[in-house]
Image (spheres, grey):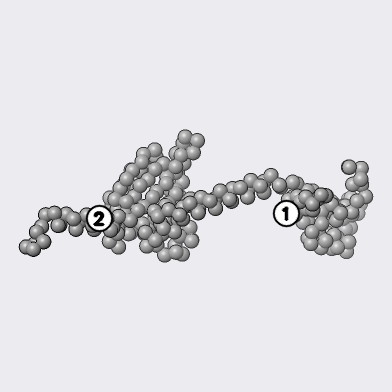
């Protein structure tokens, strides 16, 4: 009950190592401001995640220079926000696990071309150093991909065309300087019916292309005379 709060010690309502240190310092005349997240123990074994702030109130003009004698303590319930944050982190973890489970290299970009997500297979297919992706330098990643393409001008022109047609889906074949042949499939990333970016998937076709070339050679050439 509100009436029971009058005269109650602050530590009886919000106690943590920070609170203990704060009120001990305040009793010695050293009362500054404090704001942080705190986990409160409630009756019946319940807990409350809250944001707690303590701010000394200014003294009366007649007592200028005197130490504050009162403080404003605020507690804001953060349980709902924390629950939503935990759910969001869980969804992101599931999404990353899904990306890592696929055999294709996956890259997700926003409407401006910025990198939103990727999996390790994407870096492996393009031969990227691990630290390049960890730095999250979008320009450096794109520059690496452009350098790896054997036809950089055609590669750049195709990307420009896709940027202009945000709703188009496309399937292309890329040849890299490493000798790899990649199939690139891109589709718009839709949210509420509007394009918010693109999802790119890359699949290594090198072995399949090499096998098809061997089949073509055997079909057109006699194995004895060549």
Which residue corresponds to the image point at 37% horizontal and 62% vertical from the top-left?
A: 127
Say which quarter of the image contains residue 182.
Answer: bottom left
Is residue 142 shown to the viewer in this render? yes
Is residue 155 shown to the viewer in this render? no
From the viewer's side, name the closer residue of 54 and 186.
186
Which residue corresponds to the image point at 81% horizontal and 49% vertical from the top-left?
A: 44
Expressed as whole percent of the image width and height from the top left, the position of residue 156 reads 32, 50
Q: Which residue is mark 1?
A: 37
Expressed as whole percent of the image width and height from the top left, the position of residue 46 reads 77, 50
In this rendering, position of residue 81 left or right of residue 52: left
Report the disc number at residue 147.
none
Mark 1, other Cα within 10 Å: few <14 / some 14–19 / many ≥20? some
Quadrant of image for the C terminus: bottom left
Say which quarter of the image contains residue 138.
Answer: bottom left
Quadrant of image for the N terminus: top right
Distance from disc 2 to disc 1, alpha carbons, whole Å, reads 58 Å
Which residue corresponds to the image point at 36% horizontal and 52% vertical from the top-left?
A: 202
Mark 2, other Cα within 10 Å: few <14 / some 14–19 / many ≥20? some
Q: Secondary structure under badge 2?
A: helix
Q: Which residue is mark 2?
A: 209
Mark 2 or 1, nearer chain start: 1
Expressed as whole percent of the image width and height from the top left, the position of residue 102 reads 43, 53
In this rendering, position of residue 127 left or right of residue 92: left
Expressed as whole percent of the image width and height from the top left, the position of residue 159 reads 34, 47
Q: Secondary structure under badge 1?
A: strand
Residue reaching furthest to the front: 224
């Amino acid at each position: 009950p509100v009436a029971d709060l009058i005269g109650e010690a602050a530590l009886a309502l919000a106690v943590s190592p920070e609170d203990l240190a704060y009120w001990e310092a305040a009793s010695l005349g050293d009362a500054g401001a404090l704001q942080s997240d705190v986990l409160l123990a409630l009756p019946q074994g319940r807990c409350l995640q809250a944001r707690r702030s303590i701010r000394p109130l200014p003294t009366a003009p007649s007592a200028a220079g005197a130490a504050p004698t009162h403080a404003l303590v605020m507690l804001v319930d953060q349980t709902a926000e924390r629950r939503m944050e935990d759910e969001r982190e869980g969804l992101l973890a599931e999404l990353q696990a899904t990306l890592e489970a696929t055999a294709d290299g996956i890259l997700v970009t926003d409407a401006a071309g910025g990198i939103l997500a990727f999996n390790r297979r994407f870096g492996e297919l393009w031969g990227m150093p691990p630290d390049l992706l960890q730095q999250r330098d979008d320009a450096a990643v794109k520059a690496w991909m452009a350098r790896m393409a054997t036809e950089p001008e055609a590669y750049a022109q195709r990307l420009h065309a896709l940027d202009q047609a945000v709703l188009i889906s496309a399937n292309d074949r890329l040849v890299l300087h490493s000798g790899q042949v990649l199939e690139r499939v891109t589709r718009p990333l839709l949210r509420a019916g509007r394009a918010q970016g693109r999802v790119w998937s890359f699949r290594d076709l090198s072995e399949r292309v090499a096998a098809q070339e061997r089949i073509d050679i055997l079909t057109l050439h006699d194995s004895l005379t060549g």
